[in-house]
Amino acid sequence: MRLVIMTAGSRGDVAPYTGLGAGLARSGHEVTLVTHGLFEPLTAGSGVRFHPTPVDPHAELHSERGRGLHASTTGLGKLLRVVSMARSAAEEMTDDLVLVARGSDAVLAAGAVAPLGRAIAEGLTLPSLGLFLQPQHPTREFGAPMLGGRSLGAVGNHLGGMAVTTAVDQVFTRAMRRLRTRHGMTLPGLAASRRAHERARWPVLHGFSEAVVSRPRDWRPGLEIAGYWWPHDTRSLPPDVEEFLAAGPAPVFIGLGSATVPDPERLSGEIARALRAAGLRGIIQQGWAGLAARSDEVITVGDVPHASLFPRTAAVVHHAGAGTTAAVLRAGVPSVPVPVQFDAGFWAARLVALGTAPCAVPLRRLTADALAPALRRAVGDPAHRSRAQEVARRLAEEDGVAPVLAALDRLAS
């Protein structure tokens, strides 16, 4: 089949689909990934074709609107701000998504663009399915991940999940108008379309493991947990990183991925002081936050392959995005999650519950005095590494691509 995978967001919202796409391509499918042009290098050598969309998420997050996300202290406040930001971005991406879908046999829509992907597939009378990296459907069993995941009780959890679903629909109001006016598609409203797809049990596969998040018992049929989709990344570590690793004990990796922070200089100083206080070496990743520190015991790096580096660390301090959380679990090392926003609080709580992390240190409370004891616990208590290795062994036995191939067979039949 000619398949188009549609996604949007930060690197963690894109990279898993390069590995999934590579697996689908090896099975004979022709796969095109459609997302921000910034991420085209991620598909190099994967066998996955790439079509760029015009939006630059790095520029968006560093704009005045993007920096405004840090002004909100609640999950709902941040969600409402990002909905406002994403509305125009979704409209800008629409024409490219339609263009590639017209030459495809099926649409595979990431959670970030699911309402729009479903609508495009419906307008072109193509089959479709969802490929989600977070559990987005409402459930009574845990709080809505996009609101931080804090449980509000069975009823509150379900209502929170419904609120997130409604908010996500609002992202695509302009894009839907564009489908009708520019592309001539006759489509129902977003809410009506969502209800119809739910009644029809629209298939959604989730790219995480049941070893990390059990399938909620109140989910409808058609919502499956497939297992992780590991990014395609064959790079080696840079020479300076190899030299640093060889020069002493295993270091701690500190990186916030695609997250931004209000004051990178202050935060970098707190991280460096925490490493000194804990007596640990450190590799600090600059990332989109712009972190930087250097001494005999600390180096700053750019983009490095997590799969090659993480297994060689003493622990990983990270922003608890879905992709980085997966990479840490795969590596079998303890971690200290530093949740910044959206689903990060949910994943951080899962790591603590699994026993692979001693605690979470939310960004707004990250100081040397808070981080240093968390690092000492993560590195010094062998139970965290033991538990991390146990989870990693289970993940190594799973194949997240196989359930997607099975779902495609069902679509084609």
Image (cartoon, helix red, strand yellow):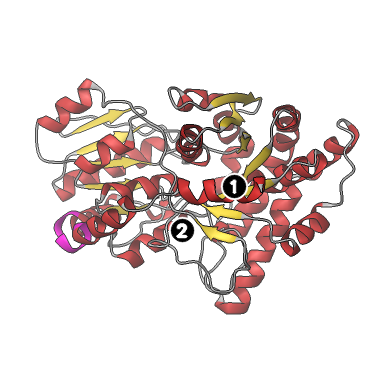
Q: Locate residue 136 relative to residue 385 in the image: left or right.
A: right
What range of the chain is rendered magenta? 379-385
Q: Is residue 328 above or below residue 385?
A: above
Task: Give the quadrant of residue 290.
Answer: top left
Q: Looking at the image, which residue is at 39% across and 61% down?
A: 212
Q: Is residue 238 above or below residue 203?
A: above
**Viewer-nearest residue: 294 or 344:** 344
Mark 2 residue type: Gly
Could you say whether the residue bearing mark 2 is in a helix, strand or loop?
helix
Camera-near label (2 vs 1) is 1
Name the residue that disc number 2 marks: 345
**Marks 2/1: CA–CA distance:** 36 Å
Residue lying at the far bottom of the rendered structure: 154
**Viewer-nearest residue: 3 or 142:** 3
Bin the neighbour count of mark 2 within 10 Å (Cα to Cα): few under 14, some 14-19, many 20 and up: many
Q: Looking at the image, which residue is at 24% across and 51% down?
A: 333
Mark 1 residue type: Asp
Percent position of residue 309, x then y: 26, 36
Label whose residue precedes the other's in the sequence (2 or 1): 2
**Viewer-nearest residue: 288 or 141:** 141
Residue lying at the far front of the rendered structure: 413
Percent position of residue 306, x then y: 32, 37
Percent position of residue 70, x then y: 54, 47
Q: Is residue 196 magenta?
A: no
Q: Locate residue 366 relative to residue 62 in the image: left or right.
A: left
Residue lying at the far left of the rendered structure: 248
Name the residue that disc number 1 marks: 409
Q: Decide if residue 328 is in sight here.
A: yes
